[in-house]
Image: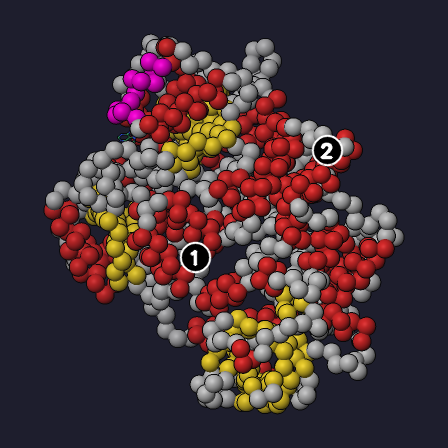
Amino acid sequence: MLELSTPIKFVKRVGERVAEALAKRGVETVEDLLYHLPFRYEDRLNPMPISQLKAGAMASIIGEVRGSVLLRTRSMPIFEMTVGQGLDTVKCMWFHGSYLKDRFKAGQMVALYGKLEASRSSVGKFKMIQPQFEILPGSDSAEAEFVSLEVGRIVPVYEFLGGTTAWGAKLTSRWLRRVVWGLLEELKGSESGVAETLPAAMLERLGLPGRLDALHAVHFPEAGTPVAELMSASTPAHKRLIFEELFYLELGLELKRRRLREREGTAFATDERVRKALKQILPFHPTAAQKRVLGEIAADMRKPQPMRRLLQGDVGSGKTIVAMQAALVAIENGYQAALMAPTEILATQHYLSARKLLGDAISPRTGRPYRVTLLTGSLDDAAKREVRGRIYRGETELAIGTHALIEEKVDFDNLGLVIVDEQHRFGVQQRFRLMRKPGADGRSAEPDVLVMTATPIPRTLALTLYGDLETSVIDELPPGRTPVVTRRTTEERAEDVWAFVRKHVAAGQQAYIVYPVIEGAKDDQPELDFAPDEDGEQDAAAEKKAAPSTPLRSSRDDTSSKQKKTTKAAKAEKLFAPRRALRAATDMYEELRASALAGLRLGLLHGRLSSDDKEVVMRRFQRGEIDVLIATTVIEVGVDVPNASVMVIEHAERFGLAQMHQLRGRVGRGAAKSYCILMTGGRVSEAAEARLDAMVATQNGFELAELDLEQRGPGEFFGTRQAGMPEFRVANLLRDRAVLELAKAEATRFAQHPDSAMTKEERDAVWARLKQQWQRRYGLVEA
Ligand code: ADP
Ligand code: MG
């Protein structure tokens, strides 16, 4: 008997070989395959006549093959085919199209999907370049059984899952339709086939269909379903499946938060003495937002459960002082605090800030100055051992270092608070438990954890990726900041830019000039972390716009992967064209020093310098002994030199939005009016154009973050794929915000108030399913 959990290899038409291929894409069971939803639909019931179509849009067309020809041009073979409806015709072209030579016969009906363009050669007619196609079965077809899946209905089109049939043909949408149709038919007839996963009362209240109905309707929509709703995954059937996935995610996060509340932490006191200690380190009046978030943090720290809090604040909003004050709460209670940063430069920078803030302060508790230690990779082994020893013996109150250094090798005497600056929060939490010697009484409470980020996190991500943390937001900048004036210009106007820099240096200001790479014409450069060459992304962008429901995966459909091959071939040809070299930090340092900025004191900072050298350069820039710092993105986060008021970013077309925003955040920190100059030098893609425009238009980190998320997708948003982002089967965070909010509300409601309309069996089934899902999907073993 077929069930959702049946391994896919037992399904008709699949078998061992195909099952292996599908497993690579995470499709192992019947359920997995059914949740591989169509990424678009073609209305072959009421297809648009060609005469009603407009150039410029994606279109699906059904027509008759009128004729075809393989043109052998000098550069490549091109396959041309004319498809017609009565007097109207569309000319289709496939580059490197020899493989299509014998595929079509005149009189066949075909379905085409692609971008419709006006054809210059014949007025009033259209052409399609490399459309996707399907040859429709004729009524005399040997496979008449399946004709109804291909024509005269709204037809699902699937993303290619890999794999071939026994005779080597790709597993196309057509193949998937047949398999999925077969599965649905069989499940419909079976008793135990598709268990409902959501309580009936919930479905009814939300107006969502049952599970099997929903699956049926997303794969084979009923006639009359609006195609636009299908394409945007907003039919009730889609919503139901998306809701199901997000509900279980949010319920899992809710469960995690609850479990945390049962764990043992430290209840720190925040009495008068502690408050006095916090006050005495303040170099300025905190903003209302800083006060509020400190209050939220202190309230968490007073509780006997471990704190798990995310502190968000745009660049320059003043997170450092808040972090230092939180550290003091722990320290004044007799505990140690650790501050972990992603890079050595940043760790060093934090160390310098800490020294500055705590430098002359005397701890009311001990009557002695605070002891702050920096643990960097550049210390030799003996020195490292010595520092670790001090931390272990409790001879330092605040240990600052990079994540790797502190996480892996340090045992604390009595660690009370861990502050994690920027990113990297996953995989570290479990180890905090181990970082501390068990107390004299044998118990070992967990330290509090405060994660700080200057990357404004769009709400959808905050609700998922960071969903198990409480959040605090500093939504106000310190007083006296003027917005950074942001302008775009091009390399051709470099002389004006250098003159501008000279002028500001003459007025006593400092400047940054940032490059995407350290050295020109070499490959293995650590700072080469900008978006890869964006050639061809326009096609991809066009496609994305047309099919907003496209999941964030790779290849699509049978025909589109062929299309990909040809663009690759075109790209290979392009490689032989001379490429303009990128301007690089080291080269430009020499060049500017010798010419445009001669006479100014220049410094060079990049990731290849030893940590000692980095520190020397940073200190000199901080002390004003360097006028212009030529750097790579190593200065992206954290660097704080209020006297710097000009930020020049060369090859700005190469930088991601988050990076540019961070870089711009290095200026505008002091009293002087500040400037950010985005210089482009090379082809500016459509996406880069949008990024640059957004930078000029706004300084609101949250707005930029939303755009960044849209451009790069959740997986890349934090600059790393392993940011712990759950993989969704049907949900798409960019598209399904409303459903996510609903799922979150429903999950909280479900966990908190037993609903009298639900039976105990239903509730138990939900919890059981959650455990099973989290184990399988996220690998989180729940105790
Ligand atoms: P970020 O949130 O980016 O880490 P910082 O903590 O580095 O920001 O603060 C940016 C700058 O603003 C620093 O020079 C800091 O001393 C200053 N600053 C922070 N808070 C205030 C405040 N309330 N009043 C005046 N200056 C402040
Ligand atoms: Mg900071």
Q: Quadrant of residue 66?
A: bottom right
Q: Residue at x 40, y 44 (%)?
A: 702
Left or right of residue 616: residue 434: right
The boundaries of the magenta stretch are 275-286
Reply yes or no: does residue 367 show up in magenta.
no
* Disc 1 secondary structure class: loop
Left or right of residue 290: residue 82: right
Asked whether residue 568 appears in the rendered view, the answer is no
760 up-or-down from 533: above or below: above
Q: Residue at x 71, y 53 (%)?
A: 214
Q: How is the image coloured?
A: secondary structure
Return the mark for residue 531. 1
Q: Which residue is mark 2?
A: 757
User: In the depicted view, which residue is nearer to us: 396 or 555?
Assistant: 555
Placement of the C terminus among the 4 image quadrants: top right
Residue 574 on image: x %, y %: 43, 74
Residue lying farthest right? 1
Reply yes or no: does residue 284 show up in magenta.
yes
Q: Quadrant of residue 468?
A: top right
* Disc 2 secondary structure class: loop
Left or right of residue 14: residue 521: left
The type of residue carrying mark 1 is Ala
User: In the depicted view, which residue is nearer to us: 779 or 485?
Assistant: 485
